[in-house]
Image (cartoon, rainbow, N blue to C red):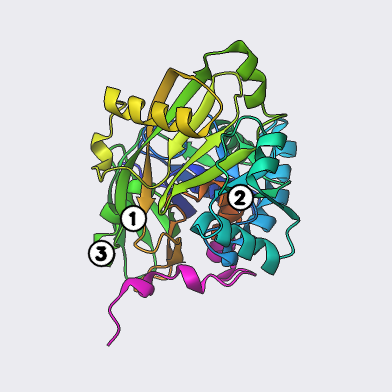
Amino acid sequence: MNQTHYDIIVLGLGANGSSALYHLSKTGKKVLGLDRFHPPHQRGSSHGGSRIIRQAYFEHPLYVPLIRAAYPLWEEIEAVAGTTLFRKTGGLMLGREETAVVKGALLSAQLHDIPYEYLDAAAIRRRFPAFRAPEDTVGVLETEAGILLPEDCIRAFLSSAVQNGATLQTDEPVLAIQPENKGIITVTTNKGRYRTDKLILTAGAWTGALVPDLRLPLTVKRQVLFWFDPAEPKQQAWFQPDRMPVFTWEYQPGKMFYGIPDLGNGVKLAPHHRGRTIDADNMKQDTGDGEIAEMQNLAANWLAMDPVYRDSSVCMYTNTPDEDFIIDFHPRFPNIIVASPCSGHGFKFSSLTGQLLCQLAIEGRTPFDLSPFRIDRFQPRS
């Protein structure tokens, strides 16, 4: 079997792994990227044609410096790959005043001096006729939010990495990761055996199974993405990117859905953190009639459209219990870096997280405080 030695191996080439391989490829190190499928693909979390990027981060203000640092790195890979990956539309966080989405977005905007507008329901309806905003609805509008094209982003990272000399092996599931006493790691796949000084593990829904000794509390949930067309031709203009921002709407306490304007294949809508737990190896593109009807009713109630179903796609959220990332060294093997910057909100950061993983592998540190993402936060305290 093949036993080629690499300075660094990246295992898992979705959003974060492809970015890490790209950043590593600029260092002159001998690097290998491995994936069980052929990215980009529809078997994980980084597909569906579009992803939201935003700065007034309702989840927690600690993410704002990270997302701000991600923006110029998206510009960098756009320039390197010679393709458009980001489209600015603005972003609107919607709900009642007391909802987590509104309060969280306001907190992040105010703490980090993010320009925003606070809109009442009448202003929302006047500015953006796509939304049926009840009188108790308010919105936090930021200008720099927009849309990333996930499949194109991954292609750009990987093609640029290969041009820089990185090696790419796809359709090659990993069977075992074996750290050795002399600081070497052996990675065995269904096709070969590779040795490396350092390993970056960014395998998404498969991460926990590849490092079972860590007992990472990751859950994998099925998420369905939907596309709808307005039935009335006069409604279609309201849902174009120049008239509708990306949005997240907490329409009931703890229940939210998000949307992306029509990029040519319909208005994209999806629930946030509503899916059932699944086995990653058995994810199917199996949207049911009941799921379609539920989202269709949601669209009819909250958006100014008579929604006509067009398409759907199934992806996965890989979640930590607190919905924050994991980015840390393995507790027993410091030459293994484990990264799960996921939990349903990680794609937008991947231009930066790839750079952070590169810095951890090369220098052992980053300019950012990553302690909120440490592995041992899940361990019981004595």
On screen, residue 247 above or below 107: above
Chain-order first, disc 3 or disc 1: 1
Question: Which residue type carries mark 3?
Answer: Arg
Q: Which residue is mark 3?
A: 215
| Callouts 2 and 3 close, C-beta under 8 Å | no
Q: Quadrant of the N terminus?
A: top left
Picture residue at 73% right of the left edge, 31% below the top: 82
Residue 295: % across, % down: 39, 30
Q: Nearer the viewer, residue 345 or 79?
A: 345
Number of the label disc, if any, that sits on residue 138? 2
Residues at discs 3 and 1 in contact (Cβ within 8 Å): no
Residue 256 % position (x, y): 45, 46
Stretch of the chain drawn in magenta: 358-382
Question: What residue type is disc 2 on?
Answer: Val
Question: Magenta stretch containing residue 372, yes or no?
Answer: yes
* Residue 132 located left or right of residue 78: left
Q: Is residue 32 visible?
A: yes
